Amino acid sequence: MPVAHDAAPPLTLLPPSAFAQGCPTRVILDDITNRWSPLILAALLGEPLRFSVLRAKIEGISEKMLSQNLKVLVRHGLVDRDVTPTIPPQVTYSLTTPGIELAAMMCTLIHWVGSRAQEFESVQGQYDQDASSSRTEEL
């Protein structure tokens, strides 16, 4: 499917340093665009959640992955970790102001992907079929 390049925003919106290997934004982008961070941010949009509720809300995430991703998001200042000194301690996670801004953008991305899921599956199926045919022809 051809892409209309004039429909995309110009790359000049990004500074040239954004494409440099040593650009500090790459670390943050890696952390916020991994498999789980967009879903964690989206899940926290709207209300603070305890760890167990957050884990139940995001199907398929392990405790280890949720814990690791939350630590990274807290470190970047996107998520706030509030500990209530009870026995056992009650930990609640919520979005900071930058976290709310990012979560809104992630939700837009998630909706965009979801609205095109069938299209992506169709294109992937065609690609896989073409690749399979190419391998068969090589034999």
Image (tube, rainbow, N blue to C red):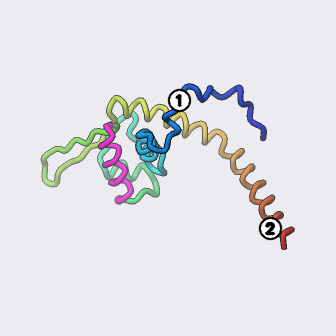
**Whether residue 109 is situated above or below residue 51 in the rendered picture:** above
Q: Position of residue 100 (x, y in %)?
A: 39, 31
Residue 74: in magenta span: yes
The residue that label 2 is drawn on is 135
Earlier in the chain: of badge 1 and badge 2, it is 1
- Specify whether 10 is left or right of 47: right
Label 2 neighbour load within 10 Å: few <14, some 14-19, many 20+: few
* Residue in the foreground of this view, choosing between 11 and 110: 11
Q: How far from the left and from the top, in percent, is residue 29?
A: 46, 42
| Front residue of 35 and 10 | 10
Q: Residue at x 81, y 58 (%)?
A: 130
Residue 53 within the magenta-colored segment of the rendering:
no
What secondary structure is found at the residue carrying circle 2? Answer: helix
Residue stretch rendered in magenta on the structure: 63-77
**Residue under pointer 1:** 14
Q: Would residue 120 appear left or right of 126 to someone viewing this image?
A: left
Which element carries disc 1, helix, strand or loop?
A: loop
> Amino acid under label 1?
Leu
